[in-house]
Structures are given as C-alpha cells and as structure tokens.
C-alpha cells in the first residue's frame, strides 16, 4: 500500500516515514502544499496523511483542490489545530479522518489501517482469503495457521492483493502501489515477486489472467474472507 505523507516539520516527517515503512507501506513525502497537490493529482496513492499548516498552500486548500479535481484518495488530516472549527473545515473540504498533534504513532497507524479498510470495503481488522490470513496490525501473514516468512516487498504485494482480492490487478497498477516515487520501478520484477508468493502460498492462489494481470482467489473448497 502506498502512502503520501504531507508534513513540513523535518523531525516529525522522519519519524513518521520510518514508522510507516516499518508498518509495511511505501511512503512518498511532500513538505509543502504545492508539491503535495501535484503528487496527489498525478500519483495513485492508497491514502494521504495531510498536515493543515503547510508552506505555500495550506492543507485545506490542497484538499479542496483534490476533491474538485475528483481525487478520491482517502485523507487523514494531521494537524496541531485542535479547535472544532478547524476540524469542521477539514471534514467539509473532504477529509475522511482527523488526528490532532501531539499524538501517539500507534493511533495514527490504527486510524490509517481503518481508513484503508473502509476504502477497500473491508470491515474486519484482519484480511482473509480462504485459509490465507493477513494481519496489518502486526504486519504478519499465515496460511492455514502456519506463519509465512515474507520480505517487505512480498508483504506489500500480498497486502495489496488481499485488499483487492477477486479483482484482476494489472502489473502497472501493482508497480504504482508497491514502490515509492524514488524507487527504480520495473514492472518485470512483479513477475518475480508473484513467483515467490506462489511458492509460499500455493501456486493456485494467484491466478494469471492472460494479458490483464493477476487475481488472488481462495483454493477450491475454501471460502473467501
């Protein structure tokens, strides 16, 4: 899952980028409103963490412009402004959730997980696909109760496919949601990671739809979560 972090405080930005990366997300960072607006309009993020008090263009204006441009990416507002009127302005601009500084990083991660679940139509905190289970809170996965040993990129790929299980996902879409903007992207590497996951999950759990992409499905006789 790929996140845009919009925060102008250097220390907090570094802290949050590390925490998000440790939680299994690919993270892009913008330190002002102009860069944030551009990235939000041109990159396919799964969610945005958006500070309101930004240089150049304030966060509420950025969010309003995104929504006017039909950018539907879920947005969690992160700000030092605790007044109720600021919260109302953020929600009216199109925010999906709100967190006031100072905050605990675990709360931010929990709210982000909930935001991602809602946007993908999942209610339960864990994701299941037949005997396959993924717990975003602990960044762990298992098959029929047996823990899986996954690299960070394998976990990101599995997480995204489980969020969108049953749907055909193209290689380009997977590349866009697996890697941050600074990564040397190569869609051919997706085939490598798909192959690795098949060895760990069972080959039939990831179906190749020729010319279109890949689809995560439960094994025959299993019930999708």
Image (cartoon, grey):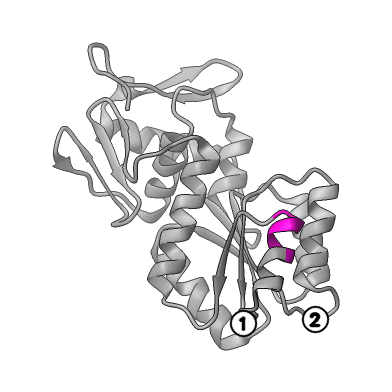
The boundaries of the magenta stretch are 89-94
Q: Main secondary structure of the magenta part?
A: helix
Q: Closer to the observer: label 1 or label 2?
A: 1
Describe residue 52's horizontal placement relative to residue 169 as left or right: right
Quadrant for the C terminus, please. top left
At horizontal 34% and vertical 36% (from top left) the residue drawn is 197
Let me know if residue 158 is in the magenta part: no
Q: What is the residue that sits farthest to the top in this orientation? A: 221
Residue 51 visible somewhere in the drawing: no
| Whole-percent x, y for residue 12 in the image | 55, 83
The residue that label 2 is drawn on is: 55
For label 2, count other residues whose C-alpha is less than 10 Å away and answer few (under 14), some (14-19) or many (20+). few
Decide which of 63, 36 is in the foreground and name it: 63
Residue 80 tag number: 1
Query: Left or right: 185 with respect to 148?
Result: right
Q: Is residue 196 toward the left or the right of residue 2 in the image?
A: left
């Amino acid at each position: 899952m790929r996140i845009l972090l919009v925060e102008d405080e250097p220390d907090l930005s570094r802290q949050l980028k590390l925490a998000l990366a440790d939680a299994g997300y690919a993270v892009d960072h913008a330190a002002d409103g102009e860069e944030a607006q551009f990235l939000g309009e041109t990159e396919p993020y799964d969610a945005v963490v958006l500070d309101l008090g930004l240089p150049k263009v304030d966060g509420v204006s950025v969010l309003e412009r995104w929504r006017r441009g039909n950018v539907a990416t879920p947005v969690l507002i992160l700000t030092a402004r605790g007044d109720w009127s600021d919260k109302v302005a953020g929600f009216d601009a199109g925010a999906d959730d709100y967190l006031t500084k100072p905050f605990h990083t675990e709360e931010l991660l929990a709210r982000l997980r909930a935001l991602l679940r809602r946007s993908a139509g999942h209610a339960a905190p864990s994701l299941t696909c037949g005997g396959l289970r993924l717990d975003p809170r602990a960044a762990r996965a298992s098959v029929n109760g047996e823990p899986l040993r996954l690299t960070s990129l394998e976990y990101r790929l599995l997480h995204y496919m489980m969020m969108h299980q049953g749907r055909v996902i193209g290689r380009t879409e997977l590349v866009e949601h697996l890697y941050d903007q600074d990564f040397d992207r190569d869609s051919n590497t997706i085939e490598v990671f798909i192959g690795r996951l098949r060895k760990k999950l069972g080959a039939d759990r990831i179906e190749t739809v020729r010319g279109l992409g890949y689809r995560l499905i439960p094994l025959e006789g299993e019930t999708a979560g």
